Amino acid sequence: MRRFLYLLAIACCLGAHGGVLLLHERAGAYLISLFSADAPLRAGSQDFTVLVQTAADGNIVSDCRVELSFRRANTAQVRIDAQVGQSANKLLYAAPAQLGAGVWQFTISVQPSGGAFAEAHGTVTILPEQPPIAAYWPYFAVPPIAVLLFTLNRWLKRRSKSTSRKIFMG
């Protein structure tokens, strides 16, 4: 049982990218993938990352200019330059964005140095902000569950001792 708990604790800490794939599309000579840090996407601050690969052999392209642009009906376009230095994974181009709730059309523009320009398009739905109680309820639920499990453990140990006494006494 302890091994299982150790493995569970290690697995929780070892997230690869930890995000969700929103788009994987071939655009010209490139494969462009867009990831999001959260699922589902909620209004407010978002972290998007882009992976650019050559379509022929899947090699990673790390020397290009990547721009994300988001557009929602009746709003101004949001443009963000994705940078390699902003991402924890140096193979991905990171772009933080502030987006409101709604359906957004996005375009990923890739301009490699010495390569052909490519664009990938998609749509993403961003849900309204979650109320704080809905976002943090697991943190409030843990202490009562821990107390309940401790109480159950004590009760089972007492019950086990009284049963073993009756067997030896009887």
Image (cartoon, helix red, strand yellow):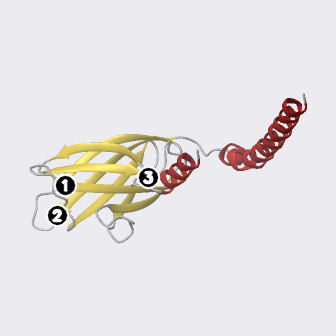
What residue is shown at x 37% (from left), y 50% (from top)? Answer: 35
Q: Quadrant of the C terminus?
A: top right
Viewer-nearest of discs 1 and 2: 1
C-alpha separation, residue under disc 3 versus residue under disc 1: 20 Å
> Which sits earlier in the primary sequence, circle 3 or circle 2?
3
Spatial CA distance of label 1 from label 2 is: 11 Å
Q: Amino acid at mark 1?
A: Gln
Going by the numbered disc 3, the residue's amino acid type is: Gly
Q: Residue 61 location in percent, x, y?
A: 19, 61
Q: Secondary structure at mark 1?
A: strand
Q: Which mark sits nearer the N-terminus, 1 or 2?
A: 1
In the rendering, at what x and y percent does residue 30 appear? Answer: 16, 51
Q: Which residue is mark 1?
A: 53
Q: Is residue 15 left or right of residue 33?
A: right
Front one among 135 and 9:
9
Q: Secondary structure at mark 2?
A: strand
Q: Is residue 88 above or below residue 166?
A: below
Q: Going by the image, does 59 lie left or right of 148?
A: left
Q: Is residue 22 left or right of residue 120?
A: right
> Residue 43: x percent and y percent?
55, 48
User: Which structural element holds mark 3?
Assistant: loop
Which residue is disc 3 drawn over? 18
- Sequence order check, earlier mark of 3 and 1: 3
Toward which corner of the image does residue 94 lie, by quadrant? bottom left
- Which of these two is toward me, 3 or 35? 3
Crowd tier of the residue under label 2, counting other residues whose Cα lies within 10 Å: few below 14, some 14–19, many 20 or above = some
Depth order, front residue of 41/107: 41
Count up the numbered dots: 3
